Image: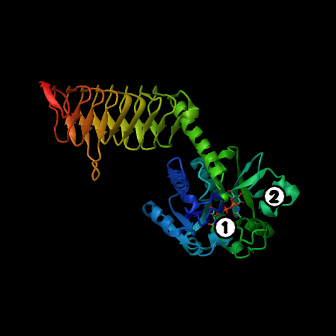
Protein backbone atom coordinates (compact mmCIF):
# COMPACT_ATOMS: atom_id res chain seq x y z
CA UNK A 1 0.00 0.00 0.00
CA UNK A 2 1.21 3.48 -0.84
CA UNK A 3 0.92 6.34 1.64
CA UNK A 4 -1.23 8.82 -0.30
CA UNK A 5 -2.97 9.62 -3.57
CA UNK A 6 -4.74 12.78 -4.64
CA UNK A 7 -8.30 12.84 -5.86
CA UNK A 8 -9.38 15.92 -7.77
CA UNK A 9 -13.08 16.54 -8.18
CA UNK A 10 -13.69 18.01 -11.60
CA UNK A 11 -16.89 16.52 -12.95
CA UNK A 12 -19.13 19.51 -12.29
CA UNK A 13 -20.39 21.52 -15.20
CA UNK A 14 -19.93 24.86 -13.50
CA UNK A 15 -23.42 26.09 -14.35
CA UNK A 16 -22.69 29.52 -12.94
CA UNK A 17 -19.87 30.01 -15.48
CA UNK A 18 -22.53 30.02 -18.27
CA UNK A 19 -20.17 28.22 -20.60
CA UNK A 20 -19.89 25.26 -22.96
CA UNK A 21 -16.40 24.59 -21.63
CA UNK A 22 -16.09 22.40 -18.53
CA UNK A 23 -15.34 24.70 -15.62
CA UNK A 24 -11.91 23.31 -14.75
CA UNK A 25 -10.70 23.99 -18.30
CA UNK A 26 -11.27 27.72 -18.03
CA UNK A 27 -7.90 29.47 -18.10
CA UNK A 28 -6.38 31.38 -15.26
CA UNK A 29 -3.28 33.32 -16.34
CA UNK A 30 -2.48 31.00 -19.20
CA UNK A 31 -3.26 27.66 -17.60
CA UNK A 32 -6.54 25.76 -17.09
CA UNK A 33 -7.76 25.70 -13.48
CA UNK A 34 -7.13 21.98 -13.15
CA UNK A 35 -3.50 22.33 -14.23
CA UNK A 36 -2.88 24.81 -11.43
CA UNK A 37 -4.14 22.19 -8.97
CA UNK A 38 -2.09 19.37 -10.53
CA UNK A 39 1.06 21.52 -10.62
CA UNK A 40 0.69 22.43 -6.95
CA UNK A 41 0.22 18.77 -6.10
CA UNK A 42 3.41 17.73 -7.87
CA UNK A 43 5.26 20.65 -6.28
CA UNK A 44 4.05 19.25 -2.94
CA UNK A 45 5.54 15.89 -3.88
CA UNK A 46 2.24 14.09 -4.44
CA UNK A 47 2.46 12.45 -7.82
CA UNK A 48 -0.30 9.84 -7.87
CA UNK A 49 -3.44 11.67 -8.90
CA UNK A 50 -6.91 10.69 -10.03
CA UNK A 51 -9.23 13.20 -11.65
CA UNK A 52 -12.99 12.66 -11.50
CA UNK A 53 -14.45 13.75 -14.84
CA UNK A 54 -18.08 14.13 -15.83
CA UNK A 55 -19.34 17.12 -17.76
CA UNK A 56 -17.19 17.41 -20.91
CA UNK A 57 -15.23 14.35 -19.83
CA UNK A 58 -13.87 13.61 -23.31
CA UNK A 59 -12.42 17.07 -23.68
CA UNK A 60 -11.03 17.01 -20.16
CA UNK A 61 -9.51 13.53 -20.55
CA UNK A 62 -7.91 14.63 -23.81
CA UNK A 63 -6.40 17.72 -22.16
CA UNK A 64 -5.03 15.60 -19.31
CA UNK A 65 -3.58 12.96 -21.62
CA UNK A 66 0.07 13.95 -21.12
CA UNK A 67 -0.15 14.62 -17.40
CA UNK A 68 0.22 11.06 -16.20
CA UNK A 69 -2.98 11.13 -14.15
CA UNK A 70 -5.74 8.56 -13.98
CA UNK A 71 -9.33 9.52 -14.56
CA UNK A 72 -12.59 8.18 -13.15
CA UNK A 73 -15.83 8.96 -14.92
CA UNK A 74 -18.80 10.12 -12.86
CA UNK A 75 -21.80 9.20 -15.03
CA UNK A 76 -24.49 11.29 -13.34
CA UNK A 77 -23.49 14.39 -11.46
CA UNK A 78 -25.09 13.48 -8.15
CA UNK A 79 -22.79 15.56 -5.94
CA UNK A 80 -19.26 15.65 -4.55
CA UNK A 81 -19.85 12.54 -2.41
CA UNK A 82 -20.89 10.54 -5.44
CA UNK A 83 -17.88 11.94 -7.32
CA UNK A 84 -15.51 10.51 -4.69
CA UNK A 85 -17.29 7.18 -4.82
CA UNK A 86 -16.52 6.78 -8.56
CA UNK A 87 -12.81 6.53 -7.70
CA UNK A 88 -13.31 3.95 -4.95
CA UNK A 89 -11.83 1.04 -6.90
CA UNK A 90 -8.75 3.07 -7.82
CA UNK A 91 -8.05 4.07 -4.23
CA UNK A 92 -9.25 1.47 -1.77
CA UNK A 93 -6.68 -1.25 -2.23
CA UNK A 94 -3.65 0.82 -3.11
CA UNK A 95 -3.55 3.89 -0.89
CA UNK A 96 -3.71 4.32 2.87
CA UNK A 97 -4.72 7.98 2.65
CA UNK A 98 -6.29 10.23 0.09
CA UNK A 99 -6.12 13.98 -0.26
CA UNK A 100 -9.19 15.38 -1.98
CA UNK A 101 -9.03 18.72 -3.77
CA UNK A 102 -11.56 20.63 -5.85
CA UNK A 103 -10.54 21.13 -9.46
CA UNK A 104 -12.10 24.60 -9.27
CA UNK A 105 -9.84 25.86 -6.46
CA UNK A 106 -6.60 26.69 -8.31
CA UNK A 107 -4.78 28.90 -5.81
CA UNK A 108 -3.98 26.40 -3.10
CA UNK A 109 -0.25 26.60 -2.41
CA UNK A 110 2.05 23.55 -2.56
CA UNK A 111 3.27 24.25 1.01
CA UNK A 112 -0.32 24.13 2.22
CA UNK A 113 -1.02 20.82 0.47
CA UNK A 114 2.17 19.38 1.90
CA UNK A 115 1.40 20.61 5.40
CA UNK A 116 -2.17 19.25 5.26
CA UNK A 117 -0.98 15.83 4.08
CA UNK A 118 1.89 15.62 6.58
CA UNK A 119 -0.22 16.74 9.51
CA UNK A 120 -2.92 14.22 8.59
CA UNK A 121 -0.55 11.32 8.15
CA UNK A 122 1.21 12.07 11.43
CA UNK A 123 -2.10 12.20 13.32
CA UNK A 124 -4.57 9.50 14.18
CA UNK A 125 -7.46 11.47 12.69
CA UNK A 126 -9.83 9.82 10.25
CA UNK A 127 -9.92 13.10 8.37
CA UNK A 128 -8.19 16.48 8.33
CA UNK A 129 -9.86 19.53 6.78
CA UNK A 130 -8.18 22.62 5.37
CA UNK A 131 -10.20 25.57 6.66
CA UNK A 132 -9.91 29.35 6.73
CA UNK A 133 -11.47 32.19 8.67
CA UNK A 134 -13.03 34.75 6.34
CA UNK A 135 -15.13 37.91 6.64
CA UNK A 136 -17.55 36.82 3.94
CA UNK A 137 -18.20 33.06 4.15
CA UNK A 138 -21.00 33.07 1.57
CA UNK A 139 -20.96 30.19 -0.88
CA UNK A 140 -18.75 27.95 1.28
CA UNK A 141 -19.48 25.12 3.68
CA UNK A 142 -19.35 26.31 7.31
CA UNK A 143 -17.27 24.43 9.89
CA UNK A 144 -19.37 23.63 12.92
CA UNK A 145 -17.27 23.01 16.04
CA UNK A 146 -18.58 21.64 19.30
CA UNK A 147 -17.16 21.55 22.82
CA UNK A 148 -13.33 21.49 22.91
CA UNK A 149 -13.34 23.00 19.42
CA UNK A 150 -13.92 19.56 17.93
CA UNK A 151 -15.25 19.58 14.38
CA UNK A 152 -18.74 18.08 14.40
CA UNK A 153 -19.86 18.77 10.84
CA UNK A 154 -19.77 20.95 7.77
CA UNK A 155 -23.01 22.69 6.84
CA UNK A 156 -23.55 23.78 3.26
CA UNK A 157 -24.87 27.28 2.78
CA UNK A 158 -28.25 26.19 1.42
CA UNK A 159 -28.87 24.04 4.48
CA UNK A 160 -27.36 26.36 7.08
CA UNK A 161 -29.49 27.81 9.84
CA UNK A 162 -29.12 31.55 10.42
CA UNK A 163 -26.75 31.07 13.35
CA UNK A 164 -24.66 28.66 11.28
CA UNK A 165 -24.63 31.07 8.34
CA UNK A 166 -22.78 33.54 10.56
CA UNK A 167 -19.89 31.10 11.12
CA UNK A 168 -16.74 32.58 9.64
CA UNK A 169 -14.71 29.39 9.49
CA UNK A 170 -15.20 27.80 6.08
CA UNK A 171 -14.20 24.58 4.42
CA UNK A 172 -11.76 24.99 1.55
CA UNK A 173 -12.99 21.82 -0.12
CA UNK A 174 -9.56 20.27 0.48
CA UNK A 175 -9.29 17.39 2.92
CA UNK A 176 -7.28 14.32 3.77
CA UNK A 177 -8.89 11.03 4.75
CA UNK A 178 -7.81 7.61 5.83
CA UNK A 179 -9.07 5.72 2.81
CA UNK A 180 -10.78 3.07 4.92
CA UNK A 181 -12.72 5.60 7.01
CA UNK A 182 -13.62 7.59 3.90
CA UNK A 183 -15.36 4.76 2.07
CA UNK A 184 -16.89 3.22 5.19
CA UNK A 185 -18.69 6.45 5.94
CA UNK A 186 -19.32 7.59 2.40
CA UNK A 187 -21.79 4.76 1.85
CA UNK A 188 -23.92 6.30 4.62
CA UNK A 189 -24.22 9.73 2.95
CA UNK A 190 -27.75 10.52 1.76
CA UNK A 191 -29.06 13.10 -0.68
CA UNK A 192 -31.42 14.64 1.88
CA UNK A 193 -30.46 18.31 1.51
CA UNK A 194 -31.42 21.53 -0.30
CA UNK A 195 -29.72 20.48 -3.52
CA UNK A 196 -30.75 16.81 -3.41
CA UNK A 197 -27.09 15.90 -3.92
CA UNK A 198 -24.76 13.46 -2.19
CA UNK A 199 -22.57 15.93 -0.32
CA UNK A 200 -19.09 14.74 0.49
CA UNK A 201 -19.20 17.21 3.35
CA UNK A 202 -21.94 15.18 5.10
CA UNK A 203 -19.28 12.61 5.84
CA UNK A 204 -17.87 14.66 8.70
CA UNK A 205 -21.04 14.45 10.72
CA UNK A 206 -21.05 10.69 10.12
CA UNK A 207 -17.42 10.36 11.23
CA UNK A 208 -18.15 12.48 14.30
CA UNK A 209 -21.07 10.17 15.12
CA UNK A 210 -18.69 7.22 14.97
CA UNK A 211 -16.40 9.07 17.44
CA UNK A 212 -13.66 9.33 14.84
CA UNK A 213 -11.27 12.24 15.23
CA UNK A 214 -11.42 15.07 12.67
CA UNK A 215 -8.42 17.35 12.54
CA UNK A 216 -7.95 20.67 10.81
CA UNK A 217 -5.34 22.92 9.30
CA UNK A 218 -6.51 26.52 9.51
CA UNK A 219 -4.79 28.65 6.91
CA UNK A 220 -4.20 32.35 7.50
CA UNK A 221 -3.89 32.95 3.78
CA UNK A 222 -7.58 32.64 2.89
CA UNK A 223 -6.95 33.87 -0.67
CA UNK A 224 -5.55 30.51 -1.58
CA UNK A 225 -8.76 28.59 -0.99
CA UNK A 226 -10.99 30.59 -3.31
CA UNK A 227 -13.22 28.33 -5.40
CA UNK A 228 -14.15 29.45 -8.90
CA UNK A 229 -17.88 29.25 -9.47
CA UNK A 230 -18.43 32.28 -11.73
CA UNK A 231 -16.56 34.54 -14.14
CA UNK A 232 -16.35 37.11 -11.35
CA UNK A 233 -14.57 34.53 -9.16
CA UNK A 234 -12.22 33.83 -12.07
CA UNK A 235 -11.30 37.51 -12.31
CA UNK A 236 -10.81 37.67 -8.54
CA UNK A 237 -8.50 34.65 -8.65
CA UNK A 238 -6.54 36.17 -11.54
CA UNK A 239 -6.00 39.34 -9.53
CA UNK A 240 -4.76 37.34 -6.53
CA UNK A 241 -2.43 35.19 -8.62
CA UNK A 242 -1.14 38.18 -10.54
CA UNK A 243 -0.29 40.00 -7.31
CA UNK A 244 1.45 36.86 -6.01
CA UNK A 245 3.65 36.67 -9.12
CA UNK A 246 4.56 40.37 -9.03
CA UNK A 247 5.34 40.26 -5.32
CA UNK A 248 7.66 37.31 -5.69
CA UNK A 249 9.48 39.00 -8.58
CA UNK A 250 9.88 42.20 -6.56
CA UNK A 251 11.16 40.13 -3.64
CA UNK A 252 13.80 38.65 -5.92
CA UNK A 253 15.06 42.07 -7.03
CA UNK A 254 12.97 43.06 -10.05
CA UNK A 255 11.43 46.54 -10.24
CA UNK A 256 7.81 46.59 -11.33
CA UNK A 257 7.09 50.22 -12.14
CA UNK A 258 3.31 49.98 -12.25
CA UNK A 259 1.92 46.71 -10.85
CA UNK A 260 -1.65 47.71 -11.70
CA UNK A 261 -0.99 47.55 -15.45
CA UNK A 262 1.63 44.81 -15.53
CA UNK A 263 0.64 41.23 -16.20
CA UNK A 264 3.29 38.57 -15.73
CA UNK A 265 2.24 34.95 -15.91
CA UNK A 266 3.38 32.50 -13.24
CA UNK A 267 6.56 30.75 -14.32
CA UNK A 268 8.18 33.70 -16.11
CA UNK A 269 11.77 34.20 -14.93
CA UNK A 270 13.31 37.66 -14.64
CA UNK A 271 16.80 38.49 -13.36
CA UNK A 272 17.66 41.01 -10.66
CA UNK A 273 17.84 44.74 -11.36
CA UNK A 274 15.65 44.38 -14.39
CA UNK A 275 12.89 46.98 -14.65
CA UNK A 276 9.46 46.24 -16.05
CA UNK A 277 7.62 49.39 -17.14
CA UNK A 278 3.86 49.89 -17.27
CA UNK A 279 1.37 48.09 -19.52
CA UNK A 280 3.61 45.11 -20.17
CA UNK A 281 2.46 41.52 -20.62
CA UNK A 282 4.95 38.67 -20.14
CA UNK A 283 4.01 35.02 -20.68
CA UNK A 284 5.00 32.09 -18.48
CA UNK A 285 7.48 30.49 -20.88
CA UNK A 286 9.79 33.51 -20.88
CA UNK A 287 13.23 34.09 -19.36
CA UNK A 288 14.72 37.55 -19.03
CA UNK A 289 18.22 38.22 -17.71
CA UNK A 290 19.58 40.85 -15.35
CA UNK A 291 19.56 44.63 -15.84
CA UNK A 292 17.03 44.57 -18.66
CA UNK A 293 14.51 47.32 -19.35
CA UNK A 294 11.21 45.99 -20.64
CA UNK A 295 8.27 48.18 -21.67
CA UNK A 296 6.25 50.29 -21.43
CA UNK A 297 3.68 48.61 -23.67
CA UNK A 298 5.65 45.46 -24.50
CA UNK A 299 4.18 42.02 -25.12
CA UNK A 300 6.46 39.04 -24.63
CA UNK A 301 4.91 35.76 -25.70
CA UNK A 302 6.02 32.16 -25.05
CA UNK A 303 9.43 30.82 -26.02
CA UNK A 304 11.38 34.05 -25.50
CA UNK A 305 14.86 34.05 -23.93
CA UNK A 306 16.47 37.42 -23.28
CA UNK A 307 20.07 37.89 -22.08
CA UNK A 308 21.46 40.57 -19.76
CA UNK A 309 21.28 44.34 -20.23
CA UNK A 310 18.72 44.16 -23.02
CA UNK A 311 16.24 46.96 -23.78
CA UNK A 312 12.84 46.09 -25.20
CA UNK A 313 10.63 49.14 -25.61
CA UNK A 314 7.16 50.29 -26.49
CA UNK A 315 4.89 48.42 -28.89
CA UNK A 316 7.31 45.54 -29.30
CA UNK A 317 5.98 42.00 -29.61
CA UNK A 318 8.32 39.02 -29.26
CA UNK A 319 7.54 35.31 -29.67
CA UNK A 320 9.83 32.22 -29.81
CA UNK A 321 12.80 34.57 -29.98
CA UNK A 322 16.24 34.67 -28.36
CA UNK A 323 17.99 37.97 -27.76
CA UNK A 324 21.66 38.32 -26.80
CA UNK A 325 23.25 40.57 -24.17
CA UNK A 326 23.20 44.33 -24.68
CA UNK A 327 20.81 44.30 -27.64
CA UNK A 328 18.22 47.06 -28.14
CA UNK A 329 14.74 46.55 -29.59
CA UNK A 330 13.17 49.81 -28.61
CA UNK A 331 10.17 50.72 -30.74
CA UNK A 332 7.27 49.27 -32.77
CA UNK A 333 8.81 45.93 -33.67
CA UNK A 334 7.65 42.34 -34.18
CA UNK A 335 10.22 39.56 -33.88
CA UNK A 336 8.87 36.03 -34.28
CA UNK A 337 11.01 32.85 -34.46
CA UNK A 338 14.14 34.98 -34.42
CA UNK A 339 17.62 34.57 -32.98
CA UNK A 340 19.27 37.90 -32.28
CA UNK A 341 22.91 38.06 -31.21
CA UNK A 342 24.68 40.39 -28.81
CA UNK A 343 24.85 44.20 -29.09
CA UNK A 344 22.44 44.31 -32.01
CA UNK A 345 20.37 47.42 -32.69
CA UNK A 346 16.92 46.73 -34.05
CA UNK A 347 15.53 49.94 -35.59
CA UNK A 348 11.99 51.17 -35.03
CA UNK A 349 9.36 49.34 -37.02
CA UNK A 350 11.45 46.27 -37.85
CA UNK A 351 9.26 43.28 -38.70
CA UNK A 352 10.16 39.65 -39.23
CA UNK A 353 7.87 37.87 -41.69
CA UNK A 354 8.10 34.47 -40.02
CA UNK A 355 4.94 32.93 -41.47
CA UNK A 356 4.26 32.48 -45.16
CA UNK A 357 0.77 31.08 -44.70
CA UNK A 358 2.03 27.49 -44.44
CA UNK A 359 5.19 27.25 -42.40
CA UNK A 360 7.02 29.31 -39.82
CA UNK A 361 10.69 30.02 -40.49
CA UNK A 362 13.53 31.51 -38.52
CA UNK A 363 15.39 34.75 -38.88
CA UNK A 364 18.94 35.01 -37.58
CA UNK A 365 20.54 38.35 -36.79
CA UNK A 366 24.17 38.00 -35.74
CA UNK A 367 26.18 39.96 -33.16
CA UNK A 368 26.67 43.67 -33.73
CA UNK A 369 24.23 43.96 -36.65
CA UNK A 370 22.44 47.26 -37.18
CA UNK A 371 18.92 46.91 -38.53
CA UNK A 372 17.65 50.19 -40.00
CA UNK A 373 14.18 51.50 -39.26
CA UNK A 374 11.30 49.88 -41.07
CA UNK A 375 13.29 46.83 -42.20
CA UNK A 376 11.32 43.75 -43.24
CA UNK A 377 13.11 40.44 -42.88
CA UNK A 378 11.38 37.65 -44.78
CA UNK A 379 12.30 34.33 -43.12
CA UNK A 380 14.21 32.14 -43.46
CA UNK A 381 17.01 34.68 -43.70
CA UNK A 382 20.22 35.59 -41.94
CA UNK A 383 21.84 38.96 -41.29
CA UNK A 384 25.58 38.44 -40.73
CA UNK A 385 27.77 39.81 -37.98
CA UNK A 386 28.08 43.62 -38.01
CA UNK A 387 25.96 43.88 -41.19
CA UNK A 388 23.67 46.88 -41.70
CA UNK A 389 20.33 47.45 -43.41
CA UNK A 390 19.15 50.88 -44.55
CA UNK A 391 15.80 52.43 -43.69
CA UNK A 392 12.86 50.62 -45.29
CA UNK A 393 14.92 47.67 -46.57
CA UNK A 394 13.08 44.49 -47.54
CA UNK A 395 15.36 41.46 -47.22
CA UNK A 396 13.84 38.56 -49.17
CA UNK A 397 13.91 35.01 -47.94
CA UNK A 398 17.11 33.10 -48.44
CA UNK A 399 18.98 36.27 -49.43
CA UNK A 400 21.36 36.18 -46.49
CA UNK A 401 23.40 39.30 -45.83
CA UNK A 402 27.11 38.53 -45.42
CA UNK A 403 28.99 39.70 -42.31
CA UNK A 404 29.93 43.38 -42.44
CA UNK A 405 27.86 44.16 -45.55
CA UNK A 406 25.44 47.06 -45.86
CA UNK A 407 22.25 46.59 -47.85
CA UNK A 408 19.31 48.84 -48.71
CA UNK A 409 16.29 49.02 -50.96
CA UNK A 410 13.39 46.82 -52.00
CA UNK A 411 14.49 44.13 -52.44
CA UNK A 412 17.75 44.60 -50.56
CA UNK A 413 20.90 45.22 -52.58
CA UNK A 414 24.45 45.61 -51.36
CA UNK A 415 25.71 49.17 -51.10
CA UNK A 416 29.17 48.38 -49.91
CA UNK A 417 31.13 45.43 -48.67
C1 LIG B 1 -17.94 22.78 -2.29
C2 LIG B 1 -18.15 22.16 -0.89
C3 LIG B 1 -18.06 23.28 0.14
C4 LIG B 1 -16.74 24.00 0.03
C5 LIG B 1 -16.50 24.51 -1.40
C6 LIG B 1 -15.09 25.02 -1.54
C7 LIG B 1 -19.61 20.20 -1.18
C8 LIG B 1 -20.99 19.70 -1.01
N1 LIG B 1 -19.42 21.50 -0.86
O1 LIG B 1 -19.02 23.65 -2.53
O2 LIG B 1 -18.22 22.76 1.42
O3 LIG B 1 -16.72 25.11 0.93
O4 LIG B 1 -16.67 23.43 -2.34
O5 LIG B 1 -14.88 25.58 -2.81
O6 LIG B 1 -18.71 19.47 -1.53
N2 LIG B 1 -18.17 17.92 -8.36
C9 LIG B 1 -18.12 16.71 -9.01
N3 LIG B 1 -19.27 16.00 -9.17
C10 LIG B 1 -20.46 16.43 -8.71
C11 LIG B 1 -20.50 17.67 -8.04
C12 LIG B 1 -19.34 18.39 -7.86
O7 LIG B 1 -17.06 16.28 -9.45
O8 LIG B 1 -21.45 15.72 -8.88
C13 LIG B 1 -16.92 18.69 -8.20
C14 LIG B 1 -16.96 20.01 -8.94
O9 LIG B 1 -16.46 19.88 -10.25
C15 LIG B 1 -16.08 20.90 -8.07
C16 LIG B 1 -16.19 20.28 -6.68
O10 LIG B 1 -16.74 18.99 -6.84
O11 LIG B 1 -14.72 20.85 -8.46
C17 LIG B 1 -17.08 21.08 -5.78
O12 LIG B 1 -18.36 21.23 -6.37
P1 LIG B 1 -19.14 22.62 -6.43
O13 LIG B 1 -20.47 22.39 -7.03
O14 LIG B 1 -18.28 23.67 -7.01
O15 LIG B 1 -19.35 22.83 -4.86
P2 LIG B 1 -19.42 24.18 -4.03
O16 LIG B 1 -20.85 24.62 -3.96
O17 LIG B 1 -18.44 25.16 -4.50
CA1 LIG C 1 -16.92 25.28 -6.17
Q: Which residue is mark 1?
A: 80
Q: Residues within 10 Å of mark 2 (few under 14, many from 20)?
A: some
Q: Residue at x 69, y 72 (%)?
A: 186
In the image, is 220 to the left or to the right of 69?
right
Q: Residues within 10 Å of mark 1 (few under 14, many from 20)?
A: many
Q: Earlier in the sequence, mark 1 or mark 2?
A: 1
Q: Is residue 184 above or below residue 251?
A: below
Foreground: disc 1 or disc 2: 1
Q: Is residue 395 above or below residue 2?
A: above
Q: Residue at x 72, y 68 (%)?
A: 199
Could you say whether the residue bearing mark 2 is in a helix, strand or loop?
strand
In the image, is 329 to the left or to the right of 387?
right
Residue 396: horizontal and vertical position, in percent? Answer: 20, 39
What is the quadrant of residue 315 in the picture?
Answer: top left
Q: Quadrant of the C terminus?
A: top left
Q: Is residue 237 above or below residue 15?
A: above
How many numbered discs sit on the rendered protein?
Answer: 2
Q: CA distance from mark 1 to mark 2?
A: 19 Å
**Cβ of mark 1 under 8 A from ligand 1:** yes
Residue 137: horizontal and vertical position, in percent? Answer: 76, 51
Q: Give the number of the disc on residue 144.
A: 2
In the image, is 241 to the left or to the right of 382?
right
Residue 51: horizontal and vertical position, in percent? Answer: 55, 65
Amino acid sequence: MKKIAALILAAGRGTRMKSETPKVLHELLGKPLIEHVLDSLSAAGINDAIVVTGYGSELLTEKLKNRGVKTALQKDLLGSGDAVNTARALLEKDYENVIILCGDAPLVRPETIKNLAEKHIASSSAATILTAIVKDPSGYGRIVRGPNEKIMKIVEELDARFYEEAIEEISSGAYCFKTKDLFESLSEVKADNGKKEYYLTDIFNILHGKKKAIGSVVTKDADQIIGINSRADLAEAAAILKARVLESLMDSGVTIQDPATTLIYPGAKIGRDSVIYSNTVIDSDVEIGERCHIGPFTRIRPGVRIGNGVEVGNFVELVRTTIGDGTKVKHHTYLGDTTVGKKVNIGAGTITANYDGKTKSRTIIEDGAFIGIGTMLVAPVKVGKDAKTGAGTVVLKGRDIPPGATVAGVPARAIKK
